[in-house]
Structures are given as C-alpha cells and as structure tokens.
Image: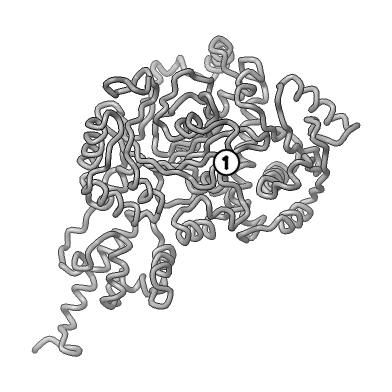
Amino acid sequence: MPARRRGGRDVAGLIRQGHFLGAKLRSLRKRNGLTLDELSARCVQIDAEGAPSVSYLSMVETGKRMPSGQMLDMLAGIFGKDSRWFLDENTEVEVAPAQRERGGLEAMPLEPAFLFSNELLQNALPELLSQTGTTGRQFAQLLIRVWQETRHNNFPDIERAAEECGGREMPLTLDALMTIGKHHGLQVRWFDDNGAGASPGNGAGAAGAAAARKLGTVLVRSRFEAPGTVLVNKRLRHQEERLKYELAFFIGHKVLHNGDGVISPHSTMHSGDEVSSSAAGMGAQDVLYSWRDFECSFFAGALLCPRIPFRRFLIREAHSVSAGRKLGVTPALVMRRMTAVSPYRHWHFFDAYSPGYLRAVYRGNGIPLPWGNMSLVSDPCPRWAVFRLLQETPASAAPAQKPKSQISVMQDGKRARLYCCHSLLTRDALDEQHVLSVGVDLLPALEAQGFDGESVVESVAESCRRGGGDGKIPAEAAANIRAASQVLNIAWIADALDGQASVICPRSGACPRQPRSCA
C-alpha cells in the first residue's frame, strides 16, 4: 500500500526525520548543560510570542512533534548550527568531548601511604606551616578552595537550606531580609565606626577593638553575638548591597549552626595587613572558623541569588555582571554565583589587590594562579587583566563603571590554553582599590560545538607571538569563539573579540615573550 500522505508529505518520512532531529536537539542541549526550561527561556529572549514551551520542546526531542521552519531556525541559531544540520538524517550525533584534565599544579601520589596517616599528618602539618610562615587560616582556606574546585562549587545541601529560608524569592529587599532575620530570632544592633565590632561598653566590642589595633588598618563591618544579635557597622547604612550580604551571612549562621557564635567577625583590611596578621602554624579552631565562613558565605549567595531564578536571570542578561544592580547585590556576589549556578563548569574567579595578593580564588577550570593567595609575590605577570587594571589605574581614580573583557593565551605544559575574563575595578568597604575578575576556559566550549579547539588556540597564540605578546584574533578563530559565546549566552566573550588577545604566564620570570617585555 502507498504510504499515507498529509498535505503532500510522507508521514513515515516526517516521523523518521523528527526522530533524528529530536535526538540531535537533545544531544546538543545536554552537551551544553541546559535544561528544557532554560532552552525555552533562551527562545523567549529571541521571540517571546513564538517561543516553544517546555512540554513542546520535550515532544520535539522525543520525535512526537516537528517544529516549524521558523522555530527550527530559532533553535539552530541558539546552538550556532544551520537548520539543515538537523534535517540531514545523519544518525551519527556528535558525542561530547571527554572531560579535560584540569590545569594548575599536578596532583602528587601520596606514597608510601603509611607516611600520610592521620596521626603523622596531625603532628607534621603544624610544624610544616610554622616553618613556611603559613597561618592555619591560610592553610584552611586553601583546603576549602580545593574542595570547592573538586565539587565544582556544587553544594546542594546549603542551597536547599537557603531556598527554604528565602522561598526562592528574588530580588530580596532589605526589609524582606530583616523579616527573615526576625523570623529566625535575629535582632540587629548598630555600632559606631570605631573598629570595635560592637557598641561602646560591650565586652566583646572591647576585645574586638584590641584585636583591630593589633591588625592595623581594619574596618570591622559586622559580627555575631550569640544567641541572636547581629552587630553592624553604621558605615553600612548607606551601602545597602553590602548590608544585605552581611545580614544574609549571619542568617546563614543562625540557620546552619543555630547561632552558637562560633563564627568570625567580618572585617575589611588593607591587603598587606592580612598576610602578617597572625602567627604561622595551625590553631585549634582555624579550620572550623574558615569552613563556617565558607558555608555562611555560600548560604548568603544562595539566599540572595537562588539557583533557578538566578540562572534564568543570567540567561536574560547574557551573564552581565553590571545587571546585578537590578537585584541589589554586589558584583562580587554576581561573579561568585555565576561559577556555582552556570551549566558550564569551566569558570574561575579572582579578587585581587595590589601589589600581588589574591583575597579570594576559585578555579573550576584549573587555571594557574596569577600569583599566590598564601603570600604576597613580587613578580606577578602584569598581562593578567586583574593586575593590568591595578597597574594602569591610579590609586586615587574613581571605580570603573564598566567591566573590561580580555582573551588570553597561556602555555600550560605542552599545550596552550585559551581563556576569557571579565574584570571590574572597584573599591572595598575601606575604599581600597581592588579588581574582581570572572572568566571561563574556552576550549571545552569550542570543542562542544565541534570546532578544533587546539587549532583555534594555536592560531590565536601564533598571532600573539608575531605581535610580541599581543595580537589580533584571526577571523576564523574569532568566528568560532563568537559562536561558542552565543551558545553559552555570555555576551562579554564576544565583547573581548573587539580587542587584542594577550599572552599571560604564571610569573614574570617565566614569561615566554621574546624579549621578555613583562619581566
């Protein structure tokens, strides 16, 4: 019998074609870490009226529906494909590339195993830290950073606690946060800007003042007094974004730790002070205090920017850091939460102070550090965007209004790597200049779209070599990077293509430039 026909079309052929199309669409979506809900949201950005629903996309992926030509063009554009690619009935759907090895220092085998027993490590570590001049707090922060990177900043238990507390409401107003705090038995008291961390006459405040004098130039922003008092510096009355974070942080302490008071005060100090602020060696509570600081900080971010609403927000705003003003949160919080909620896992984040100090680090993509976060260094590579902004901007200059983007090439062992960062010059609560920088490793994104990532990186690296360290991004490489940025929906990657690429290295002394212009 002849095949049934609908409007002149072969129904069996349409079913077969729909199956291939759906399989390809599902593969592309999963390779790029998008849920059906997020793919639908991307379509709404393009055409709010004609965008498919989540249920319709699900039927397309299972071959139960064939999208119209207009809708197929929309879906193809999101993934940087020609719509004909979905219709060629090629059953060989591209497979996602294998997980790339992380960069940075290689792990070392702990052999023989008996030398790394708990008992021996407990005895050896304090002496090692003392001999190297490393404080227990610094060592604990390093351990936590590695744990974050191992987990790719995924801590669902803390996320759930924050979402139950705030009901996934976004944005949260200051009044709403105050109400949440009262619900959990918190009261807010203000203290004068005297470094004490409490109102005059308070015993804990006097102790805080003494500690502040030992540290030198310091601003105590807030502290917690068990069982339920948050003491906040009056200076933050007119810094609502910071004030909201402080309250969210201590709400986290109340929720996660029942407000037992075993939590560090929040201080801002000049970059050189923190390095020498405490004696080397491991203190009894160093790890506990550092871990609780991390937990409460992560809770605060999840409370102010809950995962699903914030992920949708990033989609709408194309990962704009400046858009954080719409939520009433700091750029630092926007950058940190990007690394935690994005379906793309290859992120890094730095908070850098002059002359060479990193106050905060996250390296989900394993990028080598531009300088150490355990101590100050004298020769950070000035071509890193974080250092270039600090070096080129006078200390008296006003904070930058717009972040800057940069494409960078780094020789990592035998292979070159390609990064894009988005950096913002700003000032902390002590009015000290520092740079916040968030970035991604571009190779996994390029390879996920079927491009030869190694060739793209090599062409950019060759252009930089010809230019003595900086070079124009070749047209074909730029087109591939632009296509990857469109799929990732990160607008500042495409913005970086308007400038030159730059060679960066872990230290000036290891600069690959000839001559070594950054030494």
Q: Which residue is mark 1?
A: 399
Q: Nearer the viewer, residue 447 or 497?
A: 497
What is the quadrant of residue 98 in the picture? top left
Query: Residue at position x 29%, y 24% from top?
Result: 513
The N terminus lies in which quarter of the figure?
bottom left
x and y percentages locating residue 382 in the rendered image: 42, 27
Residue found at the very far right of the displayed protein? 201
Query: Residue at position x 34%, y 52% from top?
Result: 485
Query: Residue at position x 22%, y 51% from top?
Result: 450
Give left or right: position of 476 versus 151.
Answer: left
x and y percentages locating residue 361 in the rendered image: 50, 34
Q: Is residue 421 visible?
A: yes
x and y percentages locating residue 323 in the rendered image: 53, 55
Query: In terms of secondary structure, where does tag 1 sit?
Result: loop
Give left or right: position of 197 versus 353.
Answer: right
Q: Nearer the viewer, residue 284 or 24?
A: 24
Residue 503 higher or lower than 445, as above or below: above
Q: Amino acid at mark 1?
A: Pro
What is the quadrant of residue 195 in the picture? top right
Mark 1 nearby-residue class (10 Å; few <14, some 14–19, many ≥20): some
- Snapshot colouring: one colour
Count numbered badges in the picture. Answer: 1
The C terminus lies in which quarter of the figure?
top left
Q: Is residue 155 visible?
A: no
Give left or right: position of 317 versus 395.
Answer: left
Give left or right: position of 250 versus 145.
Answer: right
Residue 247 higher or lower than 392, as above or below: below
x and y percentages locating residue 130 in the rendered image: 58, 12
